[in-house]
Image: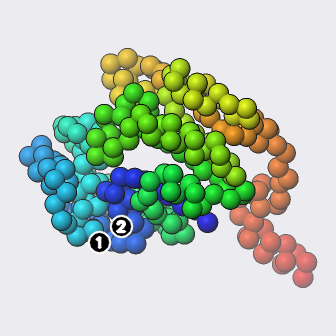
Amino acid sequence: MEVYNDFNPNLANLFRCVRDHPNELCDELRYTLNSRLDFDYVREILHTKTELPDIRRAAYFYQIIRESYASGLDSFGAQPHSMWNNFPLIHDACGRLQKVVIENKDFEKLIKQYDRPEAFFYCDPPYYNTEDYYEDVGFTRADHERLANALLSINGFFLLSYNDCPEIRELYSKPGITIEGTTRLSNIAQRYEGGKQYAELIISNYDTMARLNACKQLTLFDIVDEPEQILKERKLLWK
């Protein structure tokens, strides 16, 4: 079983509509205006939590993601963008999500519900000291501690990504926990400082390098591009 969870109801609703109603969602997006006036109008509707049909709410939220500056959902990006170019992506995502359970729960309740020895949780919480950025989600500093307590007591495995800061390092400096520092490109800073890197942490309750270096037995289907065609040709030769 594969589960996707997000506490933001607009994002969970968008994923459900992509999975269950891709054609209707594309129809709703087909004549979207890429303008500041329309952007501000749609953002205000979402911000005031006006009652909307699920597909229209999903289309509005997708519009805000695509047209906002750095996908921050706040200010208009003032960049040309055609929604039609995203329709193949929506249909691809629909196929990928067909067997995925989409939840909209508090993370602690979700972890308790799905935790078992073979379970694997990947968590991508709001970065520490950026809580105000997620005003509609309401993730607080106390929630960072609550998440740590939940993950440190699970029966399954977890992999967690965070910004690199002393508070998070201290929170997860426990026996059996692996903390690895890494960097990635800072997308927002690229236009001002090309190549700027952002420090991150990868935290887990297992040895990620051991899993990465584990030997994998290859089969015929791992090393050929068209196994079915090759088997057909072999059957012809055997005759």
* Left/right of residue 27 with respect to residue 12 in the rendered view: left
Please report contact status of discs 1 and 2: CB closer than 8 Å, yes or no: yes
Which quadrant does the N terminus fall into?
A: bottom right
At x 52% / y 57%, what residue is drawn?
110
Query: In the rendered structure, which disc, 1 or 2, sits on the residue that comes first in sequence?
Result: 2
Instruction: Give 203 or 15, whichever is nearer the viewer.
Output: 203
At x 78% / y 68%, what residue is drawn?
230
Residue 126 percent location from the top left of the image: 42, 38
Residue 20 percent location from the top left of the image: 40, 72
Check disc 1 and give the amino acid type: Glu
Q: Which residue is mark 2?
A: 17
Query: What SS does tag 2 mark?
Result: helix
Instruction: Give 82 or 152, whichever is nearer the viewer.
Output: 152
Mark 1 residue crowding within 10 angstroms, few (<14) / some (14–19) / many (20+): some
Q: Quadrant of residue 170?
A: top right
Mark 2 residue crowding within 10 angstroms, few (<14) / some (14–19) / many (20+): many
Q: Which residue is mark 1?
A: 24
Q: Where is 25 relative to 105, above or below?
A: below
Which quadrant does the C terminus fall into?
A: bottom right
Query: What SS does tag 1 mark?
Result: helix
* Left/right of residue 126 with respect to residue 178 in the rendered view: left
Residue 121 percent location from the top left of the image: 60, 50
Check disc 2 and give the amino acid type: Cys
